[in-house]
Image (cartoon, rainbow, N blue to C red):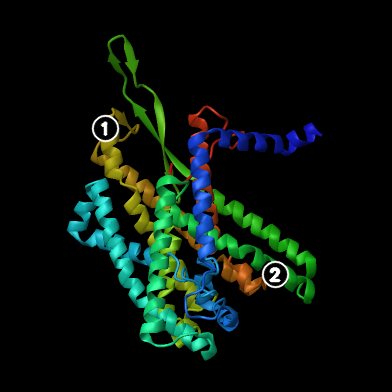
Amino acid sequence: MNKILDFLGINRFVQTIRNIFRIEELRNRIIYTILLILVFRCGSFIVIPGIDPTLLSSFSKTSREGLMGMLDLFSGGAFSNASIFALGVMPYISASIVIQLATIMIPSLQRLQREGESGRRKINQYTRGLTLLILAVQAPAYLISLHSELVSEAFLVTGFWAYTLPAAVCLVSGTMFVMWLGERITDRGLGNGISLLIMIGIIARLPHALAAEFITRFTETTGGPLLFIVEILFLMFVFMASIALVQATRRIPVQYAKRVVGNKQYGGVRQYIPLKINAAGVMPIIFAQALMFVPLLFSGFDNTSPLATAFRPYGFWYTVVFATLVIVFTYFYTAITVNPTMMADEMKKNGGFIPGVKPGKKTAEYIDTIMSRITLPGSIFLAIIAILPTFAYRFLNVDEQFAQFYGGTSLLILVGVVLDTLQQIESHLLLRHYDGLMKTGRLKGRTQ
């Protein structure tokens, strides 16, 4: 029996879990993260004061379709539950997009970005302020949508002072509290807090979507169990392709000059700079998805409006615009996160050089050229994965909710966030001289 468990890797997995909980800091971080996630999930079921939760069925059904369905997916069902966390973190993501775009165009923000930690804190304050402005528009629009979808009996109180203002304050406070939870997870927990909360919301919708697809295949003449198995196998293939995209790198050799200090020799070794094919990670697809919610905002969260209908998920224009935004944001975010000039200066200070390339400006140009070349196929592949749900829905006749997991934001967030979190756990284990999570090779998260 023990040999079977060793063959399946179960014994090694159990030993790794034991090693994780032997490290006090790592154990505390995991417990802290789980507790904050539980708070987030509990808040997703707290209905806005003044609304009868028993009469939300009509709104729940409507909000799981179209663009509202995508927003409901990222909030983990809080949107359709009329929860205090209904707007989720998307207002914060939208504000981050605007601030990062402004950083390129406004010199004062560029100077703040170069100031290090103090500048980053100042930019974060601007992002929070802009988030409040976006919430001031989105919260009333959401309440108007509730009024149009729910029967009058669903509102226990009415009027601006008795219902509208307190409900709007609850929605704004809920989003700000979710932002605070994400920041606390980033500082004292594991992984990127905002991305982790989005991932938890997505995972919360997976069992329901899987059950709906299973029931559809077994109760209707649409392929039966055989097609359901084919769908699961295809989903596994897409998962593997996404992991390959996230971890693929182009290594640039770097030679360090020999230095003799006293009786010791330093340098003289060859190392590599691992340039990620998808250096931007999952952020381009999150940014693109946030912008795709703009038509829904201007239509007052009304799925039946002409604007929302034109950009309905799995439609032609939605797919074209979404893929284009993913490619554009991949280049944009790569330009922000990868600085060839800084990399060239660091190499020059440490006596390193790329064989056949002059140090300094020529090295920066060489790195920039390679990044441009590998970003193009990476961005196209990322865009293909982003629009895979459309093909699954249109050609495989997959249920709309389950199709969201065949690619797009859902899949890439799941893969990217899980790999980032596992990479942090791997670092803690190796730092304490424990074996890593993998027997062969090492995890190459996007933070590397």
Q: Looking at the image, which residue is at 49% across and 60% down?
A: 198
Q: Count residues near mark 1 (Cα–Cα under 10 Å), then give few for <14, some for 14-19, many for 20+.
A: some
Q: Is residue 82 above or below residue 353?
A: below
Q: Nearer the viewer, residue 115 or 222?
A: 115
Question: Secondary structure beneath disc 2?
Answer: helix
From this view, report whether residue 55 is shown above or below residue 441.
Answer: below
On-image quarter of the N terminus: top right
Indicate which disc, 2 or 1, sits on the residue closer to the N terminus: 2
Identify the residue at horizontal 73%, vertical 73% (top origin): 216
> In the figure, 282 relative to 440: above or below?
below
Circle 2 residue: 213
State the residue at coordinates (44%, 53%): 193
Three-letter amino acid code at the position of disc 2: Glu
Furthest-bottom residue in this view = 152
Residue marked by disc 1:
348
Instruction: Give the number of the disc on residue 109.
Output: none
Instruction: Report how far apart the C-alphas of labels 2 and 1 lie in the structure.
Output: 57 Å
Can residue 247 be seen by looking at this rendering? no
Q: Position of residue 64 (x, y in %)?
A: 57, 76
Residue name at image x 71 percent, y 38 percent: 10
Q: Residue furthest top?
A: 263
Q: Position of residue 62 (x, y in %)?
A: 56, 81
Mark 2 or 1, closer to the camera: 2
Q: Quadrant of the C terminus?
A: top left
- In the displayed structure image, the side of residue 61 where residue 297 appears, left or right: left
Residue 232 position, x and y percent, is 69, 60
Displayed quadrant of residue 328:
bottom left
Mark 1 belongs to which amino acid?
Lys
